[in-house]
Amino acid sequence: MQRISLVNIAHEFIKKRLHSGDIAIDATVGNGHDTLFLVEQVSASGLVFGFDIQQSAINATQQKLQSTEHYNCLTLIQANHADMATKLPLKHHKHINTIMFNLGYLPGGDKTVITSTDSTLAALSSALKLLAPKGIITVMAYPGHPGGDREASSVKNWCDQLVPHHYKVHLINSSDTNLSAPRLFVIEKLTNFD
């Protein structure tokens, strides 16, 4: 069975909700692939805030995007994703249209530096408070590495606690038979209920 691209599926969900002039967050910039996608969606008048705890990820993303036409849309912040609400200007709170998470470790980087379950759950709770009405959160989780099983399971439990008439949650597995295969969580905020 051919493996499906969860990244492409996440991007398709986002394209329906994120437009020029909107504000987005890449909570874990990594090598900048999702960051570039978000910048392309919101340019030329939108904003993207990118977070990563590793300076090497910030550098890689900066290098990847600095030659793009709309680099001025991007603000990169070296910080844990759990701290994004405190690092983001207050005027943008509740106005974020999309927040992307790509959990695990930096591809090509130090595999001992990984997202942690506790900080990820804190970041997801912050993300809900930052999200605009009809906003979307995507979370790529990777159970196949040390700590990844617990993190993916905790994200699923967190999603299961969301109020159904406030949020719609989609869980997409890249494989029906491999329990350690990557999975995508898509959380759609249905309305403004704050």
Image (cartoon, helix red, strand yellow):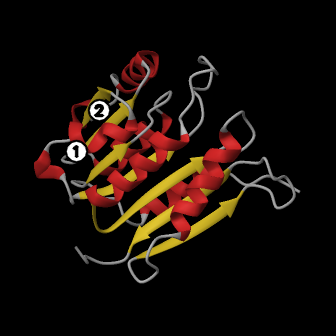
Residue at position x 57%, y 29% from top?
Answer: 114
Residue labelled with disc 2: 69
Secondary structure beneath label 2? loop
Which of the two labelled residues, at mark 1 and mark 2, occupies the earlier sequence position? 1
Work out whether 36 lies above or below 2. Answer: above
Checking the image for residue 63, the label placed there is none
Q: What is the crowding at mark 2: few (fewer than 14 residues within 10 Å), some, or many (at least 20)?
A: few
Q: Quadrant of the C terminus?
A: bottom left
- In the image, taking residue 158 as reference, residue 66 lies left or right, namely left
Furthest residue to the front? 118
Given residues 91 and 32, the one toward you in this image is: 91
Given residues 11 and 94, the one toward you in this image is: 94
Residue at position x 46%, y 80% from top?
Answer: 164
Q: Position of residue 141 (x, y in %)?
A: 62, 47
Work out whether 172 lies above or below 153. Answer: below
Residue at position x 22%, y 44% from top?
Answer: 44
Residue labelled with disc 1: 44
The span from disc 1 to disc 2 (Cα, nearest Å) is 9 Å
**Quadrant in which residue 160 is drawn:** bottom right
Secondary structure beneath label 1? loop
Given residues 186 and 17, the one toward you in this image is: 186
Tag 2: amino acid: Glu
Q: What is the crowding at mark 1: few (fewer than 14 residues within 10 Å), some, or many (at least 20)?
A: some
Tag 1: amino acid: Ala
Q: Position of residue 62 (x, y in %)?
A: 36, 22
